Amino acid sequence: NVGRTVKIGDNCVIVAGSKSVNGLPPTVELGRGCSIGSGSVLESCLVGNNAKIGDNSVVSEGCIIEPGAVLQPGTVVPPLHRIPAKQIWGGNPAKFVADVSDH
């Protein structure tokens, strides 16, 4: 499912598996107003409204990126992780950087 005004950069790979290996639905959902940076890979995950995924990031199977969350470029979110709303995360593996309101 893709919400309104979603921006998807060049050379992205968005994959919804044919069956779940973790008990969660094998779908990709992109909330309205979210942005997926160029070269990013998303696999069977949920990206909330107005979330921002930086260029060349990886969001693994079963992940939930909550509304307004931000992933810095090159971030790798391991399987089954949740990135809380309005927080900035970065690195490999992803680690908390700051609250969005701090920037």
Image (cartoon, rainbow, N blue to C red):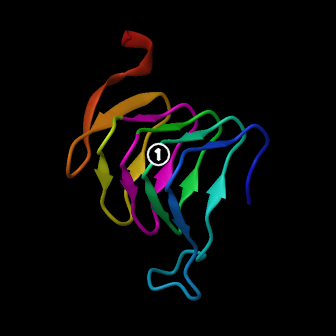
Q: What range of the chain is rendered magenta?
A: 55-71
Q: Residue 32 placed where, x, y %?
A: 72, 40
Q: Vertically, is 92 above or below 43?
A: above
User: Who's the residue at 58% across and 37% down the image?
Assistant: 67
Is residue 73 or residue 45 the one in the foreground?
Answer: 73
Identify which amino acid the numbered label 1 is placed on: Ser
Is 3 placed left or right of 41 in the picture?
right
The image quadrant that residue 18 belongs to is bottom right
Q: Residue 17 placed where, x, y %?
A: 55, 81
Residue matched to label 1: 38
- For numbered disc 1, what is the local secondary structure? loop
Is residue 91 or residue 102 the one in the foreground?
Answer: 91
Q: Vertically, is 39 above or below 72?
A: below
- Name the residue furthest left: 92
Q: Vertically, is 93 above or below 15?
A: above
In magenta stretch: residue 68: yes
Q: What's the magenta bit mostly, secondary-structure-wise?
A: loop
